[in-house]
Image: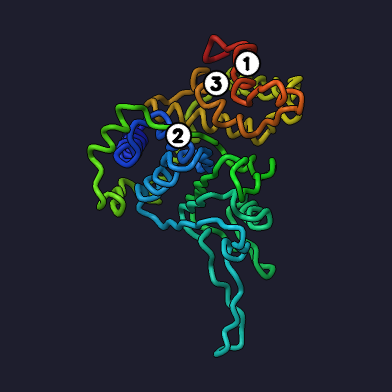
Amino acid sequence: MSREISSVVQALVDNVDKAVRGKHQQIRMAVSCLLTEGHLLLDDVPGTGKTTLAKAIADSISGSWTRVQFTPDLLPSDITGVMVYDQANGVFNFREGPVFSNVLVGDEINRGSPKTQSALLEVMEERQVTADGVSRRVPRPFFVIATQNPRDFQGTFPLPDVQLDRFTMRISLGYTDHQTEVRLLEDYHRSQRDESVESVTDAEQLERVIEAVDSIEAAPSINDYIVRIAAATRDHADLRLGVSTRGSIALLRASRAWAATADRDFVTPDDVQDVATAVCGHRIALTPEAELRGASTSSIIAGVLDEVEVPRRRDA
């Protein structure tokens, strides 16, 4: 493991820890998602720190970042940009939208209309925006950190499966434990609302780290293990939708990033298991019968991990 990777990873985790207390594992998972240059979906009830986590990650990177509050009347052009007529020169010029940044924080993404949600599809996958027949690249690295409320909340539009598949990970923070919440109340003061964490890395350095993480060793047995996990979801009796090939690739990249946060330069089966629910949970869909029985995607993934044989040798 290179010294640069270790130092950047530890600095990011420690920095975000200052803003979001008592959620070290979730923060480590979020940082792992960034190290894949993937996109992160924070799915939880209001008031658990989703937006605070997203902003802390964005502030930790000395690059450009923007925040968009999704509402039902938000238009696709409000996200990607719009052609504006220049009366002085008699031409149309493209005015860049908030996606032209290193980090886009999309708050309450499922409150936006389906048309606006779909505007993110091309840029999330292809890192470009097409307007008036011209494709424009967004800066690299590029991350979308989106938050959403549970789908049964009033005024929400559930994200379609095709858009969920664009997110590398989906995690939930959950409520803070009792002692941590007591300390939060003891330390709280009004000025904290305007505080932000300092940057600990820049876009250029982070791009180098992402490239290095992508080359972390994954033995053939690990690749085989990942494919067998994905295949088990595709044939599962309780699922109408299994993990796609894109999901298998995301699981490999996330496993490499998780190994990097553990200061290792190789992937183990434990790494795959640790990130499997965050990577695969939103990529599978239950059958109506399974939903009626009260099954959950996390329990299905846990069952698949129990059933699929674990490789015992790194060089297998």
Which dot marks residue 219? Answer: 3
Is 32 rendered above or below residue 55? above
State the SS at label 3.
loop
Q: Which residue is at a point 65% across and 55% down the rendered structure image?
A: 113
User: Mark 2 = which residue?
Assistant: 173
On the image, the x and y values in percent for residue 123 come to 60, 54
Q: Residue at x 26, y 33 (%)?
A: 183
- Left-right relation of 57 to 151: left
Q: Nearer the viewer, residue 297 or 250?
A: 297
Quarter containing the N terminus: top left
Task: Give the amino acid at mark 3.
Answer: Ala
Kindly tell me whether residue 4 is visible in this rendering: no
Residue 70 occupies quadrant: bottom right
Sequence-first disc among 3 and 2: 2
- Spatial CA distance of label 3 from label 1 is 24 Å
Tell me where residue 90 sits by quadrant.
bottom right
Q: Is residue 17 left or right of residue 229?
A: left
Give me the residue at 73% from left, 20% from top: 236
Q: Name the residue carrying label 1.
A: 303
